[in-house]
Amino acid sequence: MAQITIQQAFDLALQHHQAGRLFEAEQLYRQILTRQPSHAGAPHYLGVIAHQTGRSDNSLDLIRRAIALNPNYAEAHNNLGNVLKDKGQLDDAIMAWHQAIALNPNLPDAHGNLGAALKDKGHLDEAIAAYRRAIALNPKYAEAHTNLGSALRDKGQLDDAIAAHRQAIALNPRFAAAHNNLGVALRDKGQLDDAIAAYREAIALNPNSSDAYSNLGNVLKDQRRLDDAIAAHRQAIALRPNFAEAQSNLAAALKDNGLLDDAIAAYRQAIFLRPNYAEAHTNLGNALKDKGRLEEAIAACRQVVALYPNSPEAHSNLGTALQDHGLLDDAGAAYRQAIALNPNLAEAHYNLSLLFLARGDFPPGWEEYEWRRKRQSVPFSLSGFAEPKWDGRPLEGRTLLLHAEQGFGDSIQFIRYLPMVAQRGGKIIIECRANLQRLFQMMAGKCQVVASGQPMPAFDLHCPLLSLPGVFGTTLATIPNIVPYLEADAEDVRSWRRRLSEHSQVVKVGLVWAGSPVHKNDRNRSIKLASLAPLRKAPGVCFFSLQKGNAAAEAHSPHSDMELVDWSEELKDFADTAALIANLDLVIGVDTAVVHLAGAMGKPVWTLLPFAADWRWLLNREDNPWYPSMRLFRQSSWGDWGGVITRVAEALSLWTKNRA
């Protein structure tokens, strides 16, 4: 040591430090401090090494010693902020960075670090300003560019965010975190393939990046590549076993893949790792609800409320769990508490509307139901028109667009209001999905029916079909339920009648057992064809498949004793289905568009309902005021399809005997 000066020793220590030779650097810093106790640089960088090696308490003492020796030491204040942030003392860290900047306004690291802390505090505009100042001081500061991109993404400025991340990558192509952050912004932009490419590049650069694997899993889930998504999340967890977010993301992919028990276990593991993880508690509740474990689902939602009593979303989610369990008064109280906490929470208003409507309390129900237009998942057809929404006043020659929303069944149910709308004068255009166009045109007469996605004629006003009950002030007593209001084409009916002539001596029953798999409640409303096997015992019955979609393949191998005719491939649209239904004696099905169609045609129809049925079927009724020819068969407990089908089989045997 005697052979070199203090400055030479310090310069050598810095070289070792910058090269990652921490042991050699630390020895030199200590020797300097022994020789010159007033040397501020030595304790400062000893503190930095202590921080790098996980000795945060020792790091704080050393850096504060350096600042005591030199209060104007801007770099020491900056590194003090880094240590305080890692210890969770974010406000103190921000003060340290402000002090560093006050001492040296041209210190880009201090501006960049301050930006990261401000972002964590939710002060996005201030964070963005700090990042931009850091970049102005050092345009090649790649970390500041990608951090700026993350803040811009949180502000919803996705194009600018993507550009910032790409700039970081241009400055440092091997910057794995920037590739990962780019993937996050691209996913938000809906560019899923590009997001996957970005995540895979991040993983190639850093195979131990658990964040990149988990983010990759999320995008693969978006693309419904569920097995690949599950594998990605499992790899993230293998790399970081205490990664609570990855456990929760894994659970979501498992749930979507139908592996509910595994999903519940993964959610519980996420909560074990982070007991205050509100999102995991909420999603656990949803998974438990799907399994029919309603009391456990309610308990999970109550846990979120206990953790975050001022969270309106938590109260709203609790309300849905309570409503599914039939605890309607408690559900209503939860929704109202959510609204009291946030009067503009559309989801809570919407959930409250479903409660009103299920109870048959229609006037407040329709009013609250309009909040569906403000939900985050609102369909484009509810949010994409510049023209004003019709309020029911006389049209006086103006053109009104009635447009479909939600599912086929919803459109079929509420097209019934068309004659009432026509009485208000004016011209009417109907927009619907292509499979309904021909059916609705037969009802619409001179009104123009346009398939979704086709060029839209000019119009003055618009109204979603599901807003019409509110427009007309519909109550239980005033439901327009004169049937049929939908009819099949007469020539198509005659054509099917000729084909069914060989079955003239039997009772002809149409069957539909599954709805669209993308429906949020499809897991609970759809069944397998095999579940309907007990119906075969009814004497003198021939069954006809009305099933479409992937589930239609089940009709190729019905129960050996069930006579099932499958012409479903010839049913190209709902007009074809209507023509076949017109020649049947009865339709039996789960809650799908086909039972709505049969009800709209006035055909006898038996609808099989899950325990927590949709609002339109009301509560504890075997009939339905929307469809006079419909009979309802409800589950008496969650998931009890066996009991429902036993009652349907008994009713069918009796029905056929009475027709004999």
Image (cartoon, rainbow, N blue to C red):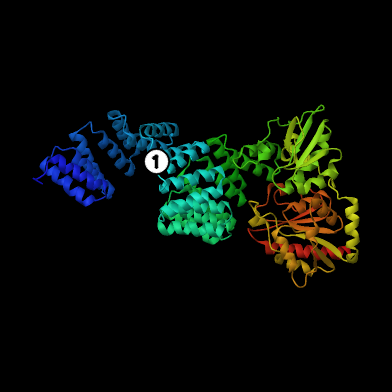
Taking the image as shown, residue 197 lies to the left or right of residue 579, namely left
Taking the image as shown, residue 500 lies to the left or right of residue 559, namely right
Please state which of residues 129 and 169 is positioned toward the viewer in this rendering.
169
**Total residue callouts:** 1
- SS for callout 1: helix
Classify 10 Å Cα crowding around label 1: few (below 14), some (14-19), many (20 and above).
many
Please state which of residues 59 and 159 is positioned toward the viewer in this rendering.
159
Residue 586 at least partly seen: yes
Location of residue 446 (image quadrant): top right
500 lies above or below 344: below
Q: Residue furthest bottom?
A: 560
Query: Looking at the picture, how far across and down is residue 56, in whole percent?
Result: 27, 46
Query: Looking at the picture, how far across and down is residue 305, in whole percent?
Result: 49, 45
Q: Which residue is at a point 79% across and 64% down the rendered structure image?
A: 566
Q: Which residue is at a point 86% across and 48% down the rendered structure image?
A: 487
Please state which of residues 37 and 289 is positioned toward the viewer in this rendering.
37
Location of residue 46 (image quadrant): top left
Q: Residue furthest left?
A: 2
Q: Which residue is at a point 48% across and 51% down the rendered structure image?
A: 199
Please state which of residues 419 and 496 is positioned toward the viewer in this rendering.
496
Query: Looking at the picture, how far across and down is residue 535, in whole percent?
Result: 77, 66
Q: Which residue is at a point 34% across and 34% down the rendered structure image?
A: 108
Instruction: State the quadrant of the C terminus.
Output: bottom right
Query: Looking at the picture, how far across and down is residue 561, in whole percent?
Result: 77, 72
Q: Which residue is mark 1?
A: 142
Taking the image as shown, residue 171 lies to the left or right of residue 544, namely left
Type of residue at label 1? Ala
191 lies above or below 104: below
Residue 295 at least partly seen: no
Taking the image as shown, residue 180 lies to the left or right of residue 633, namely left
